[in-house]
Amino acid sequence: MGRRSKYEPGAFSWVDLATTDPEAAKAFYRGLFGWEADDMPIPDGGVYSMMKLGDQTVTAISAQQQQQRDAGIPPYWFNYVTVSSADEAAKAVKQAGGSVHMEPFDVMTAGRMAVVADPTGAMLGLWEPGDHIGATLVNAPGSLTWNELATNDVPAARAFYEQVFGWKIEPVDTGDGPPYWMIGHEGGGGGRNGGMRELAPEQVEGAMPPHWLVYFAVESVDAAVEKAGTSGGSAMFGPMDLPAGRIAVLSDPQGAAFAVFEGEFDD
């Protein structure tokens, strides 16, 4: 079980869900992972629900912005990387060939953030912590355990992330499987920070854009798939066995995609 009181720059530290029906989403994930909501009012009149396992914060759920709904953007899970300075990291993103979709701004006293995209178009958040460090529990059932990029240009993405975050991205031996790259960062003590793969042919044919996918830890992938299916969700891929464990990609009832992993978790 990995309890956290801080994250080093370059580490994934937080994910949150933007959805069309927060109450339904909270009920779905409560049944799937056991999360309980701590609803926090925000200045625009909305609610940012901190989702907890016991006294530990694992993620958050909020209403998707109306302009995104109007643009046809489906509900989505969003991934954040801790940085020492959101302003400096946003500059580094531009210098490395990425783009800044939301310039750095303060989130009350919680921290400072920006929304950026890598050169292949995959979006993620930059998080400079204030009162909120990110998830206080990871790598335990019901919590964040992995972040994975699917991209149509691995060399471009690899160069970008190595320049911006100082990640060490190296290929791993997958045998007869598709190529895969492991991500580490200097502040992680040599530990893993996520993975990178090529978009599958069917994803390319379906015009799926490059994206980051969040993985949550579970005790049983098969049980999670069954429980999600009986609660209005669906399996998009798998279950499938890997050398490291067992995975499946699921969709919640509102259409947000996420993955589950069963196996040996890092501390």
Image (cartoon, rainbow, N blue to C red):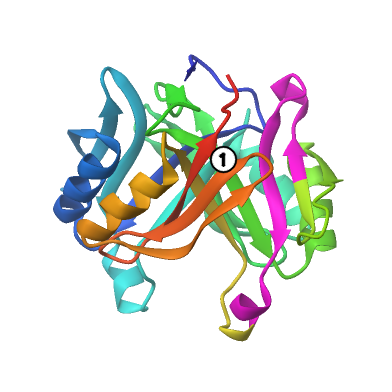
Q: At 59% across and 72% down in the image, what residue appears?
A: 209
Answer yes or no: is residue 46 visible: no
**Residue 46 image offset from top left, x and y in percent:** 18, 48
Is 107 on the left-hand or right-hand side of 161? Answer: left
* Residue under the point 78% across and 49% down: 181
Compare residues 246 and 14 and report the one nearer the observer: 246
Quadrant of the rendered image containing residue 65: bottom left
Q: Is residue 220 visible?
A: yes
Task: Name above or below for residue 6 compared with residue 179.
Answer: above
Query: What is the x, y in percent for residue 258?
Result: 44, 54
Callout 1 environment at 10 Å: few (<14), some (14 to 19), or many (20+)? many
Left or right for 226, reference 146: left
Locate the C terminus by quadrant. top right
Does residue 197 show up magenta in the picture? yes
Q: Is residue 112 left or right of residue 122?
A: left
Using the image as rendered, state which of residue 222 and residue 12 is in the foreground: 222
Percent of width and height locating residue 127: 53, 36
Residue at image position (21%, 50%) is 28
Give residue 117's position: percent from left, percent from top: 62, 59
Above or below residue 19? Residue 241 is above
Amino acid beneath label 1: Trp
Secondary structure under the numbered disc 1 in the rendered image = strand
Q: Residue at x 61, y 79 (%)?
A: 202
Q: Which residue is mark 1?
A: 146
Nearer to me, 57 or 88? 57
Q: In the image shown, does 2 or 104 lie closer to the viewer?
A: 2
Residue 229 within the magenta-colored segment of the rendering? no
- The magenta span reads 182-204
